[in-house]
Every structure is written in C-alpha cells, then in structure tokens.
Amino acid sequence: MLQELPADQVLKDLIRASRIFVAIAANSLAGDNEPLSLQQYRALALLASREGQRPADLSKSLGVTPSTTTALCDRLVQKGMISRRRRGSDRRSIYLVVSARGHEQLEMISARRGELLGEIFLRLPPPAQTQLAQALPAFIEAAGEADIDEWSIRGLVAGRSTASDWVQ
C-alpha cells in the first residue's frame, strides 16, 4: 500500500500522526491533581530508571545545565515527587530519589497514555487494527527505539544522526 501513496502524502500523514502523539503525551502529563511539564516528566522517568542519581548525572542525561537541573529538581521536590538524600559523611554528595508519589505519578501517566491510545485504536476498523499492530514493531525497529538514557533533547543538535538517538 505504501507504494500506492505518494511519498509526500505518507510524510504528511506521519507528521499529522506525530501531532496526535504529542497531544496524547501532553494530555497524559496534565494530570488531575499535579500536572508535570515535559522536562519534569523526563527527569522523573530518568530518575525512576536509575534510583539514586547524582544531579550532575541527571543534567548530563537531560542535556541541560546544572542550574537548570537544580531548578527542575526544586520543583519536583516541592511537588513531593523526588527527594534529595546524602550518602555517607560528605555533605556535597547529594543523590536524587523518586518518592512513592513520583512513582505513582509515572504509573498514572503511563495508564492515561494507554487509555487514550486504546480509545483511538478501538475506533479503527478491525482490518486497520491488524495492519497497525503489524506495522508498529517494524516502525519502532526502523527508528531504533530510544532507550531512556538517550532522551537528551539536544541529541540531534549534538551530532547524533539516527532517529534512535533523538526520538522521544
């Protein structure tokens, strides 16, 4: 079927689909009680993937300055999503840890995304559901699904050349 559509139409459809995915992601972050910004979500997800991260390591993973990370973490601490802990006697040795509330928030975001995507999927006629279910794994493989460690927004600017280096 792809051969029947002009390449520019396929790209236009992919761009339109990407807008839908962005809207779903934004909607899932809005939350009922405690909305998170995209940057806060990314930080929380990265911290949940590696408990006990140093702020400097988080800055590097996010591709932002240490001062930006400090302000970001201050907001997450205020929301009760993370805490700062010391290890050992070195007062400068600070580690960031996701709280139970932060883990709950991540689960709620994932569940909300699943609900929204599921609603859309179920609106498709059964043959289209089958086609999409078969095409998505190949699309993800072609893009090279980005590991959570590769979530730097600056990845593309930093010279990464494949989608797997910057897809979010």
Image (cartoon, rainbow, N blue to C red):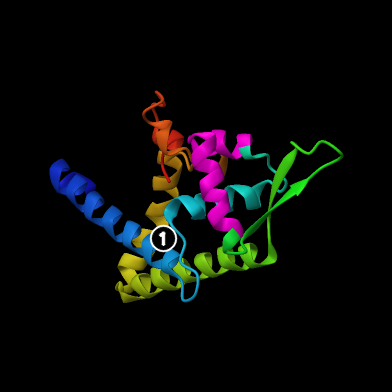
Residue at 38% from the left image edge and 53% from the top image edge: 135
Against 18, residue 122 (above or below) is below
**SS for dot 1:** helix
Residue at 59% from the left image edge and 47% from the top image edge: 46
**In this picture, residue 56 sits left or right of residue 110:** right
The range drawn in magenta is 56-77
Q: Position of residue 146 (x, y in %)?
A: 49, 41
Q: Position of residue 112 (x, y in %)?
A: 47, 71
Residue at 38% from the left image edge and 31% from the top image edge: 156
Residue at 50% from the left image edge and 53% from the top image edge: 40
Q: How many labels sit on residues?
A: 1
139 in the magenta segment: no
Amino acid on which the number 1 mark rests in the picture: Ala
Magenta segment, prevailing SS (helix, strand or loop): helix
Nearer the observer, 35 or 2: 35
Q: Quadrant of residue 79?
A: bottom right
Q: Let me know if residue 133 appears in the view.
A: yes
69 in the magenta segment: yes
* Residue holding disc 1: 133
Against 67, residue 126 (above or below) is below
Q: Position of residue 102 (x, y in %)?
A: 62, 62
Nearer the observer, 27 or 88: 88
